[in-house]
Image (tube, coloured by chain):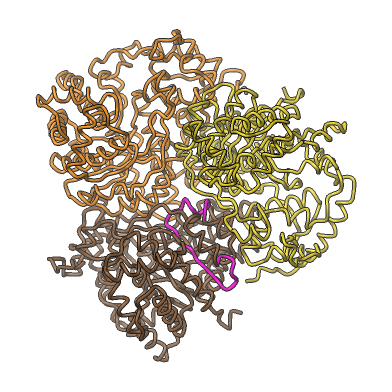
Chain colours: A orange, B brown, C yellow
Amino acid sequence: MSMHSSGTRPLELHPDRYFDADLLVRGIARSLYEETRSLPIVSPHGHVDPALLAENAPFPEPTTLLITPDHYVVRMLHSQGVSLESLGLTPTDGAPHETNPRAAWQRFAEHYYLFLGTPSAAWLDYELSEVFGVRTRLDAGSALAIYDEIAEKLQSPEFLPRALFERFNVEVLATTDAATDLLAHHARIAASGWTGRVIPTFRPDRALAVASTGWREEIGRLSSIVGAPIESAGALVAALAARRLTFKDHGARATDHGVRRPWTQRLPQQHLDAIFARAMDGKATTEDQEHFEGHMLIEMARLSVDDGLVMQLHAGVWRDHDESLLARFGHSMGGDVPMASDHVTGLHALLNAYGNHPAFRLIVFTLDESTYARELAPLAGHYSAMRLGPPWWFHDSIEGMTRFRQRTTETAGLWNTAGFNDDTRAFCSIPARHDLSRRVDANWLAGLVARHIVDLGDARRMARALAIDLARDAYRLPVPRHDK
Amino acid sequence: MSMHSSGTRPLELHPDRYFDADLLVRGIARSLYEETRSLPIVSPHGHVDPALLAENAPFPEPTTLLITPDHYVVRMLHSQGVSLESLGLTPTDGAPHETNPRAAWQRFAEHYYLFLGTPSAAWLDYELSEVFGVRTRLDAGSALAIYDEIAEKLQSPEFLPRALFERFNVEVLATTDAATDLLAHHARIAASGWTGRVIPTFRPDRALAVASTGWREEIGRLSSIVGAPIESAGALVAALAARRLTFKDHGARATDHGVRRPWTQRLPQQHLDAIFARAMDGKATTEDQEHFEGHMLIEMARLSVDDGLVMQLHAGVWRDHDESLLARFGHSMGGDVPMASDHVTGLHALLNAYGNHPAFRLIVFTLDESTYARELAPLAGHYSAMRLGPPWWFHDSIEGMTRFRQRTTETAGLWNTAGFNDDTRAFCSIPARHDLSRRVDANWLAGLVARHIVDLGDARRMARALAIDLARDAYRLPVPRHDK
Amino acid sequence: MSMHSSGTRPLELHPDRYFDADLLVRGIARSLYEETRSLPIVSPHGHVDPALLAENAPFPEPTTLLITPDHYVVRMLHSQGVSLESLGLTPTDGAPHETNPRAAWQRFAEHYYLFLGTPSAAWLDYELSEVFGVRTRLDAGSALAIYDEIAEKLQSPEFLPRALFERFNVEVLATTDAATDLLAHHARIAASGWTGRVIPTFRPDRALAVASTGWREEIGRLSSIVGAPIESAGALVAALAARRLTFKDHGARATDHGVRRPWTQRLPQQHLDAIFARAMDGKATTEDQEHFEGHMLIEMARLSVDDGLVMQLHAGVWRDHDESLLARFGHSMGGDVPMASDHVTGLHALLNAYGNHPAFRLIVFTLDESTYARELAPLAGHYSAMRLGPPWWFHDSIEGMTRFRQRTTETAGLWNTAGFNDDTRAFCSIPARHDLSRRVDANWLAGLVARHIVDLGDARRMARALAIDLARDAYRLPVPRHDK
């Protein structure tokens, strides 16, 4: 099926994009957005590689920057029969693949129509236009000229990572790092004299995944880092506690956990020991892992009470559903699929243990929107430690964000939510994502104002909260002096 | 985070509140609402204490009237770290708590911004403005003046419960009462000569909850009321049948059942006897209770066929999820959380037994919106005995009501739904809730008219059905003579 | 409750029906719809009886044509206490029922208000107005005059099935046929010299339903048709493979499977043999059938790779939930109810086997809308063989279609969806359903244009894709020469 158009089309982002058609709503949305568009970017959760900002080397050429690492992009192309190899991704066995990035870029551009109506198109158009100054829409005809234009700019000092960080007006950027990460990049940034604030986030998933192939190696690394043997679950907790403090010393404000199901339950010591022993023998099952993680999440909450790190929980996704893709290309290439989640049963133990503790803060994310109004808003609208994370991953979109607010606000209000996360490894997409979020929030608020549910003055404060205050508060980030 | 504004702001409810921004839709909504706004209030399901209207004593001061008994309000404040003690709620052990209601009111007012965008704010603003004539918006600065204004009015004859009942134009108000309630308040009202119609609803939950601590006491009370021993499930059914007739004699038109899961299944006699015996020994399990209730719901349906009482089913909530809150303050303080529900499997036995019986009427409520279009509309759109109850609890809101109609109408139509329930223990909020419902329904219908899905004449009849006719019909309430 | 209006009302379909009230959106919707309204009808999945077009005899009178075979209509009337007998349906035991079709029609018309806001009303009004030229709205007063007007027209040559097929501008119509159907009607159409394209679809449900009462008879028929004994699962697969090729010879492009749950799993040979043996003894259980079907779906996918037939999967409905209705009237009378579905676990085996095979195509339908954004869009947005079928059955409606696009597009885009299916046995409703679909799609796209999410040029191509291109592509239908 062809969607090729003839001739060059200008790339112009409409100033009222993503606002309602209704002129009353649109006018209010525009005025609310005007107040937040220039606020700094607070990015408390994401996956940018800190090496980028430690090294501050020029970005590679456009395909490696914008296409191959973007799982939203490659999964869509894959779904329409465009092979990952043909886009320049390298199979783990080194099998033949496209090695000419311009050819891969051309292939991507020919299929760019597939993204019509998706957030990927919104983000990419923003990056092309606002970050790289491209004035022509990307399609088969314009592809190579745009490639060359971006490639050239990437060589200039204004497009070095730190320069973009400053131009993007990033107040703070949190990375996500394994328990065994030595945080050398973060240390190098701190030692460099550069004032950009890049902080780590403690994510010990690999150290808790007792059924995964790499678990024992991770435990070995962890043991050697903390300088103590890890031969029991208790020793593992102690090692993680130590690493948390190191992360905190490097500026971390939060931890993060990714599990298949939101499940927590204290295990009897004997049960815990048995799982740990099986894991050490390389014989732990998937069920063992679920039980072990369920127990350890409560332990991690306990540590959060002690060290003050905010706990994030990203649950509800079947990672690597496509096993042949995993074998051919490794993790996070697009084969992850959300699952139905039960937070009411699954978080019962954790919330009963620490859900009302004044020192505890838990931010919960879901990919199961049916739980927004049914489970998450009622839980966050009750337990004082709990906040709702913003719409995650597949739901980080115009319709997705709107549904989130429509389904959570009436029960949880605004102040039990945690502001916006860009949650991206694509550094250049950060301003695109915050801009989209601020527009969609402004538009949602404008609908409330137009229907006389809140008044304009309140909506202005709510817009600012959504853009920046809620994120600072939820993640216990310091408020810059000029902003107090 | 502060949301304090400076200066006093007038409290003015906009005449077009909750209507779409679009002027065409808004105009139609306004005209539809104009036809229903002054209709009497039919309240077939709620939790007002009948003692209020039996005694007709002045309401207490504002905090006790509007804050401490409202679980929507206290849960939101709790979720933001405002303790229930500081709001004036009394812990079960009598531990220290705020005893100055003006201080509690001030605390509430300081956090009133948390309710922005929630139905609580809509209801409270209506009560302040329309019931109490307050002309200033509630915030930290205006709190005490408003407190005093309301406190003074509560002492005047126009604010006695019966006077408000008449001013609210309540045609009928159903309370909810345990099987062992002697209905003395209802009898007193009937004997008083006052013409207000206050009818009981038969809710035997405590008599069926075989695993709960109070079950044996409840059975003891029931036995003594009916004057017969209750030593088997059959005897229990007989006792409940007798109580139902007594309730019917006091004007009841309906029963109600609250269970964790919508589950029905006939038990073999032996199984039933065994559960009853375990329960008598205080050893029934949660699973026993689920089986017992599942069986007894079918028995209750059978009784409904006999005595004509409409059966209501409120299922799908984990009561007292927060166990420490339960221990400290008792039931219904905000720690209840909805769960995913399966009505297709769960109601199969009941609907196959009585779902098409012309004498049976079953009104089903859910907190799991994902079942609206998937399960409930198809079931109600088939079984002749079944009606859908209105959006319940967390979903009794502008967005919640709109989603309900958008997801049920195309399969179940309007006439398989049961009109509106205010479902409240907060007497003064009754007109607020009906007004909000009539506005949202009018607006939804206006959208159908504007899109030429129904015409204006049909929409007018539908608006009236939603405001009053469907409730009268679903609950088999008599139509007043002047309205026939 | 009465909804009778006095006087005759004209039946006029508004030219902007189903478009947003907002004038900007409406104008764009109108222009998009103008481009698709006259395109031919591609109907790749439906349930029209091919005998209709083979015999080309006049349709029976209006009640038999429009009411008794329409499960949407009879279920709604049944739900409001109008018995199926009173509508002219014949109980299986021949018990008394209405035999005067005019009386049944009158009864239907008196209850036509029940359909306000439902797709049935939209479709029926279109049929009355656009197919039959009726100019008066159907109600109790106009019923019999309308009946007579339609009855008379049905006798004229312009209302013969083939004449309507041509007037409806049907490019291709797929029927749905059992594995043991000899396709005599299709052969007769092909041999007739008439150029209308009517193709079969291979749906072997009865041959796979090992726990159903008719299974052994179906296997017997199948065995005799293919001329080989069927004494093992392997022999059954071979017989089905042969029948698929025969269907393909008669023009089939697709297969279809209906199962209760979307579940696939390869069985060990021993397990498979044991189930087959139990089935042959008439002792297979419901669980056996689920396992058997789960295995056979993977086998069918393998055959699709070989023969190129597109595989459709319609899963997630509890057929004949109302057992007394089943006993009295047989299947498909309205007692079918959707269930929650898990596609992530259930389709794992099938998708891992063939989900990325370039020769495979799988179109998945659901009745569980909560899976649109959570499961189906992510799966179809990854696996190259998978497409999303259009909103099915209860969701084939204005709101239902809109929700489908709002929840799937941001992750799966447009090109992983399969266009529209009318999915109807009601031949005269085909143009009504396509018209409604084109209007709703145009309106959804207009919303994207008005919000500057896509531009008008792209939206025009997307509208055409939704109306015709995606269906041709997904079902591998040939593109007519004039359209290439």
Q: In which quarter of the image is residue C476?
A: top right
Residue in front for this viewpoint, A68 or B372: B372
Residue A372 percent location from the top left of the image: 39, 47
Q: In this view, does C39 lie above or below C68?
A: above
The residue drawn where x is 28% and y is 50% is A348
The residue drawn where x is 37% and y is 88% is B188
Residue in front for this viewpoint, B232 or A330: B232
Q: Quadrant of residue B466?
A: bottom right
Q: Which residue lies furthest to the right in this view?
A: C156
The residue drawn where x is 30% and y is 16% is A160
Residue C118 percent location from the top left of the image: 63, 54
Residue A20 percent location from the top left of the image: 49, 42
Residue in front for this viewpoint, C187 or B41: C187
On the rendered image, what quadrant is the C terminus of chain B found in?
bottom right
Instruction: Let me know if residue B479 appears in the view.
Output: yes
Instruction: Let me know if residue B133 appears in the view.
Output: no
Q: Is residue A62 above or below residue A35?
A: above
For the magenta stretch, what is the residue range? Answer: B354-375
Q: Seen in the image, is A92 located left or right of residue C12?
A: left
